[in-house]
Amino acid sequence: MDAVTPSSDVFPPDAVEVARILGAWGVKGWVKIQPYAEDPQALFSSKRWYVKAPEGPFVVPGAPPLPPLLKVTQAKEHGDVVVAGFQDVQSRDAAEALRGARIFVPRSSFPTASADEFYWVDLIGLQVFNQDNIVLGTVVGLLETGTHCVLRVEAPTSDGPTGPATAQAPERLIPFVDAYVGRVDLAARRIEVEWALDWGLDP
């Protein structure tokens, strides 16, 4: 019996959303892209970008269906954005039809981070403990401030780590810098910080 090789068009189980298409760039089918990270190396790590439809304010009524996969022929930084061309997108109209599309790449394709660097996707879901080994909460997101990232840490409540399903748990905002973050243990799903219980807690 012959083995069946999975199609490369199948959405990867470890896909991570890394950017959004802003619209057409030029007249030859290139697009302008807004990467979510200041360093877009994760976006450049694969020549196959998986696509999903836009959400919220980016939805274009009556827009044609998006291709599930874009095969990148060239991509480069251009100021604060990235511009890219694709194998099957050859006109400005075809590029404009991609406006708002969300771009995903497999986490397994990301470049290996150095010992003191972490991808934001790997920090989501980690528990945060302070110097007294008290749980401050769980990382639910990150904010880019231009100078450094800030961890959005959802504080535990009496109803459980994330609070009751109908309530919005308070958040702590902790700068992801050496002055506050002591140790990140991805294997243990744990971040250790120098942070008091009453610091950075938004109701």
Image (tube, grey):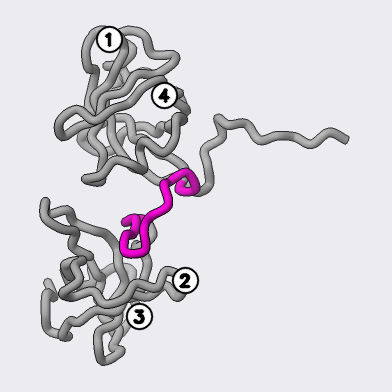
Point 36% across, 43% down: residue? 42
Instruction: Looking at the picture, tell me which residue is in the foreground, 158 or 1.
Output: 1
Quick one: SS at disc 4? strand
User: Which mark is nearer the camera, 2 or 3?
Assistant: 2
Q: CA distance from mark 2 to mark 3?
A: 23 Å
Looking at the picture, how far across and down is residue 96, in whole percent?
27, 16
Amino acid, disc 2:
Ala
Amino acid, disc 3:
Gly
Image position of 179 (left or right of 12): left
Mark 4 sits on what residue? 72
Are discs 1 and 4 less than 8 Å apart at CB? no
Looking at the picture, how far across and down is residue 10, in whole percent?
56, 34
Mark 2 sits on what residue? 187
Q: CA distance from mark 3 to mark 4?
A: 44 Å
Give the prevailing secondary structure in the magenta stretch. loop
Task: Indicate whether residue 47 is drawn in magenta.
Answer: no
Mark 1 sits on what residue? 92
Q: CA distance from mark 1 to mark 2?
A: 46 Å
Mark yes or no: residue 60 visible.
no
Which of the 4 quarters of the picture holds residue 73? top left
* Label drawn at residue 160: 3
Amino acid, disc 1:
Arg
Q: Which residues are magenta?
A: 107-121
Quick one: SS at disc 2? loop
Check the image and report above or below for 103 versus 66: below
Are discs 1 and 2 less than 8 Å apart at CB? no
Which of the 4 quarters of the picture holds residue 44? top left
Are discs 3 and 4 less than 8 Å apart at CB? no
